[in-house]
């Protein structure tokens, strides 16, 4: 019986992953580095401690990770201030079902807490969550399991009774390593073969998580 739902944010609840990809590439190109969509996919949900050496390994030591990331954040903030936040299909249905059935919920995002809470308030879902574990609140980010272990503990639950919802491979690896039931709702890419053994299920939208919580349907 699932007692806790652990939600990634960007690309899972909020349709912001496409913005992160767009503006990572723009910021890198402005700095003279030919970052591609494939490069961005490789660092989704990856903590800075892992993303920085990965990108330097691709583009060389001249890649100023902090400056380019700051520019990406600036571009993203400007876009959101102008156009607002889009939520992913099925979010409100799933949150409503969880609340009605006493399932505790936590946010588990690589984004820092200030921005995560700002975005979720803009999306009008912030107050539905029981706990927040964000990128600046853990020592080791995804794919390390710390963020999911911490979120489970914050909810007062064992990881084994928590379902973790993710759109990225690094997030799935983090959730699986923590002992959660890892469910992928793909956003920018489908799961590759090597990821599939880690999945409890892969479903197209957040609304499709509801049958899993009811114990209906097959996994994977």
Image: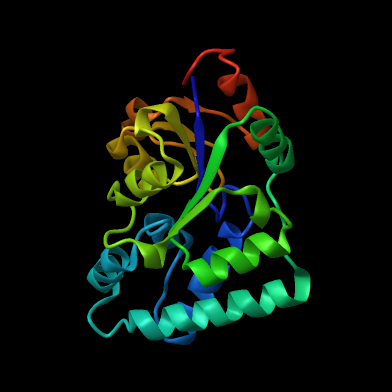
Which residue corresponds to the image point at 29% horizontal and 46% vertical from the top-left? Answer: 145
Q: Is residue 81 left or right of residue 146?
A: right
Give residue 141's position: percent from left, percent from top: 32, 58
Residue 153, quarter of picture: top left
Q: Is residue 207 above or below residue 212?
A: below
Residue 61 is left or right of residue 197, and the answer is left
- Residue name at image x 64 percent, y 60 percent: 120
Left or right, 185 with reference to 40: right
Furthest toward the front, the residue is 156
Image location of residue 117, percent across then percent down: 59, 64
Q: How many marks?
A: 0
* Residue located at (64% from left, 33% from top): 98
State whether residue 20 appears in this view.
yes
Q: 117 or 187: nearer the eye?
A: 117
Q: How is the image coloured?
A: rainbow
- Residue placed at 72% from the left, 57% from the top? 86
- The answer, for residue 143, to whether it is visible in the render is no
The picture quadrant where one finds residue 177 is top left
Q: For residue 110, which quarter of the picture?
A: bottom left
Residue 158's place in the image compared with 85, above or below, is above
Q: Position of residue 35 (x, y in %)?
A: 42, 70
The location of residue 207, given as percent across then percent down, is 68, 32
Vertical relation: 103 (above or below) 52: above
89 in relation to 53, above or below: above
Q: Residue furthest right?
A: 83
């Amino acid at each position: 019986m699932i007692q806790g739902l652990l939600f990634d944010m960007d690309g899972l609840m909020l349709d912001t992953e496409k913005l992160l990809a767009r503006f990572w590439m723009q910021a890198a190109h402005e700095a003279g580095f030919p970052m591609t969509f494939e490069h961005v996919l490789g660092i989704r949900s990856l903590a800075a401690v892992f993303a920085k050496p990965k990108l330097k390994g691709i583009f060389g030591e001249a890649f100023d990770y902090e400056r380019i990331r700051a520019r990406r954040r600036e571009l993203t903030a400007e876009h959101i201030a102008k156009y607002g936040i889009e939520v992913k299909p099925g979010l409100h249905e799933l949150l409503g079902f969880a609340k009605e059935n006493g399932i505790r919920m936590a946010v588990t995002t690589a984004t820092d807490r200030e921005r995560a809470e700002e975005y979720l308030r803009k999306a009008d879902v912030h107050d539905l969550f029981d706990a927040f574990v964000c990128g600046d609140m853990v020592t080791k980010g995804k794919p390390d399991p710390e963020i999911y272990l911490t979120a489970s503990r914050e909810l007062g639950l064992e990881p084994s009774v928590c379902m973790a919802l993710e759109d990225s491979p690094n997030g799935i690896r983090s959730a699986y390593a923590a002992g959660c039931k890892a469910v992928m709702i793909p956003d920018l890419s489908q799961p590759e073969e090597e990821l599939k053994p880690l999945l409890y299920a892969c479903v197209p939208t957040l609304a499709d998580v509801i049958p899993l919580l009811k114990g209906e349907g097959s996994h994977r």
